[in-house]
Amino acid sequence: MKERILIADDDPDIRDGCSQVLSRLGCQITETSTGAEALRLLNKYEFDLLLLDLKMPDINGLDLLRTIREQDDSLPVIMITAYGTIQNAVEAMRMGANDFLPKPFEPEELRLVIRRTLSAKRLALENLYLKEELKRKEGEVCIIGQSQPLLRVFDQIKRLAPTDSTVLITGESGTGKGLLARHIHELSQRKSHPFVSVDCSTLVPSLFESELFGHVKGAFTGAETSKVGKFELASGGTLFLDEIANINLELQAKLLKAVEEKEIARVGSQRLTKVDVRIIAATNQDLKKAVQEGKFREDLYFRLNVVAIKTPTLRERRDDIPLLADYFLKKAGEKYDRPGLGLTPAAIKFMQGYRWPGNVRELENTMERVVIFATSRSIDVEDIEAAGLRPGDGYLHPRRRKDTDRGQSFTRNGRPLTLQEVEKEHIKKVLEHTGGNRTEAAKLLKIDRKTLRLKLQRWGFEEN
């Protein structure tokens, strides 16, 4: 994107000479001969740099700089003057000028100052973006899995990523909607530009506009400096709006306008700024239902729902549980300096039978607790349960039998079973019911695990 530079100088030769030099650098130039016109242009359009003459016919350059800084402390300003003195330079820098260029100056001097100032501005934006990235990357994980539901989503992403289409990602909490959004960005033509994430569920409505669109100095109480919004931070890249259903109707209208017109105005300013961003939104709510209930704008819904992706739940990705659990176990092991931990087949089987209402996020948290409380390197069912994962209503082991299959005969070969045989058959059925989980079986039988183990040893059952 070309940098837009405003040249404010009453000398037409200076304006023309600067314009020629800067145009060759690929900059887009706007010229004016008065301070009043410069202020009008600055209030209406977005510029990347102002080249300002100290001696103007209507407004003194320092007075104009003071006015500009009261409204915007982020716009780079370079002062130029034929009356250059050390005192003027010091005063201009004290008031917020980024540099000072005395007349007459050579084209190379101008190029050097402009490049240095624009480079500093880009660096400041990059640093701001990187700070956001560091916050976001804390605790982030890569997408792991090879189950068919996940592979189908990857296939969709592979097709849509190279386009600029707006994407709506839906799915339960903890299914990795944010990771999929970043995956789309990394496979797109925008991958070399920022990926900026906004969690709409954590933003206070009164600060939502400032967060998205930015604000100018003095826009509201507490706005002591100007702020760049997420739309501007994401310029050229992708803006991810997580939990989009959490914003109110008034803010939805403003967001719709920004998405449709691809331009924003900072809070407290009428100046419009063009933004080039790809929008990816996500929600764990039913937006169609929200539209029907009047809680979400229909026009915004259709604007966001150009391409829809639904993230599969962990219940639909049971084949991925061993891979994910092992990854999280090793990750937590490194965090707490407990290397070499491994899951037994019984523990994996137990976890594959759990419902996982919190999806991948719940699995990650469970593995961290397992690492904290485990008493040995071999993680068994008892360790999973000690970490807080109780079967209860959330346990849907695939080997669980239907109610109609739970009946059992009390005869064998036409003769009644002995009490010991009935007990043996019943315990066998309960173990099948729990998928071999002896702790759960003991609870259902209302005996302690040691008693169950002794009975099984007596009947010749070996430990799994």
Image: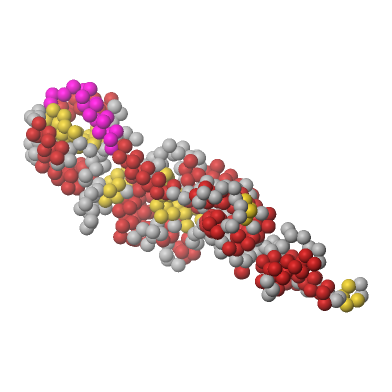
Q: In which quarter of the image is the N terminus?
A: top left
Depth check: give the residue in front, 374 or 285. 374
Q: Is residue 39 left or right of residue 338?
A: left
Please determine whether, in this image, residue 257 is positioned above or below residue 277: below
Q: Where is residue 69, by image quadrant?
A: top left
Specify the principal SS of the magenta part.
Answer: helix
Residue at 13% x, 37% y: name it: 92
- Quadrant where the image shows the C terminus: bottom right
User: Could you tell me which residue is drawn at 62 percent across and 47 percent down?
Assistant: 146
* Magenta highlight on residue 67: no
From where the camera sits, is residue 309 visible?
no
Q: In this view, does 425 lie to the left or right of 44?
A: right
Residue 229 position, x and y percent, is 32, 48
Q: Residue at x 47, y 46 (%)?
A: 182
Residue 256 lies, in percent from the top left, at: 38, 54
Who's the residue at 31% across and 37% down the image?
Answer: 123
Of 141 and 222, nearer the camera is: 141
Q: Where is residue 283 in the image (x, y as percent from the top left)?
A: 47, 57
Left or right of 325? Residue 222 is left
In the depicted structure, whether residue 111 falls above or below residue 160: above
Q: Give, as a single range, the part of the protein colored magenta.
A: 103-121
The answer to whether one can see residue 21 in this image is: yes
Q: Position of residue 448 (x, y in %)?
A: 68, 71
Asked if residue 332 is positioned above or below residue 185 in the image, the reply reads below
Q: Extreme right residue here?
A: 414
Identify the coloring: secondary structure
Rendered image quadrant of residue 39: top left
Q: How many marks?
A: 0
